[in-house]
Amino acid sequence: MKKTADNIAKVRARIQQALHKKHENKQNICLLAASKTRNPAEIRLAHQAGIYDFGENYLQEALPKIKALSGIEICWHFIGPLQSNKSKEVAEHFAWFHALDRLKIAQKLHQHRPANMPPLNICIQVNINEENSKSGITPSDLNRFISSLLPLSHLQIRGLMAIPEPQQSQDRLESTFAKMEALLQQCQQQFSELTLDTLSMGMSADLELAIAHGATIIRVGTAIFGERN
Ligand SMILES: *Cc1c(COP(=O)(O)O)cnc(C)c1O
């Protein structure tokens, strides 16, 4: 199907437009395809259209797909919430984990990361709108949380990730992304021993706004693969 390739071309054009508006041409945006519910054939099509990064939310769903696609070069990201008893598989099969918000999970990922693999890339999920029920570290706890991760040498802390509260006005969403950008800078100043080069934020509906505020990885599902069933 040519549809996937067309969709990806459209998303790439949106990315270019957003960078152009920012007068930015150095900023490197990683387009990560959020591939939950998509089968290996759909993922293969996206890969043929030039996508190398895929994000999965559920381990039971992801592992068979990773196996089925082991013949092609894919960088796998785990982008969903993780239960501690599933940490080992994530440490063994993924290059990135985007939703870290508990020390216990971090310790298990560190412990189970195979010695022959590079450190697991980590984004800390921030509860940026301070929602009661939401996962993520609140901004005021962030420095303490990062400090607790520093001894875990099999993890490489790359930056921050957010899933903004849905149905915000454009203005509020913009200030949410701006807060994330400022937080990353603040963490980088606090922890000069780390290279915090990653802001994982922006999805199909709001990727332009995220890029305007420094997103480096955008996680896009619907705009690439179409509506989910
Ligand atoms: C599904 C998902 C996305 C992609 O959402 P779309 O609106 O389909 O682009 C991004 N991030 C996470 C964590 C997701 O679960």
Image: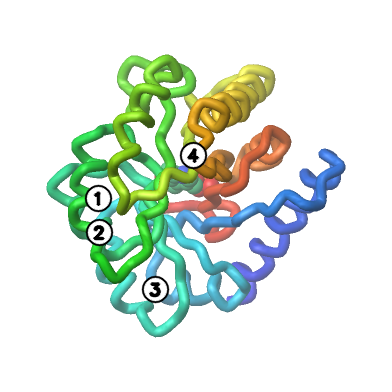
Q: CA distance from mark 4 to mark 1?
A: 19 Å
User: What residue lies at 64% left-to-right and 70% top-to-bottom?
Assistant: 5
| Residue 66, quarter of picture | bottom left
Give the mark, 2 or 3, whose residue is nearer the N terminus.
3
Three-letter amino acid code at the position of disc 2: Arg
Q: CA distance from mark 4 to mark 3?
A: 39 Å
Mark 4, residue position: 193
Q: In this rendering, does residue 173 appear at all?
A: no
Instruction: Point out which mark residue 190 bears.
Output: none
Query: Which quadrant is home to the N terminus?
Result: bottom right
Q: What percent of the width, then of the height, locates residue 134? A: 34, 24
User: What residue lies at 36% left-to-right and 53% top-to-bottom?
Assistant: 78
User: What residue lies at 43% left-to-right and 76% top-to-bottom?
Assistant: 41
> Which of the two discs, 1 and 3, sits closer to the camera?
1
Three-letter amino acid code at the position of disc 4: Glu
Mark 2, residue position: 113
Whether 113 is drawn above or below 84: the answer is below
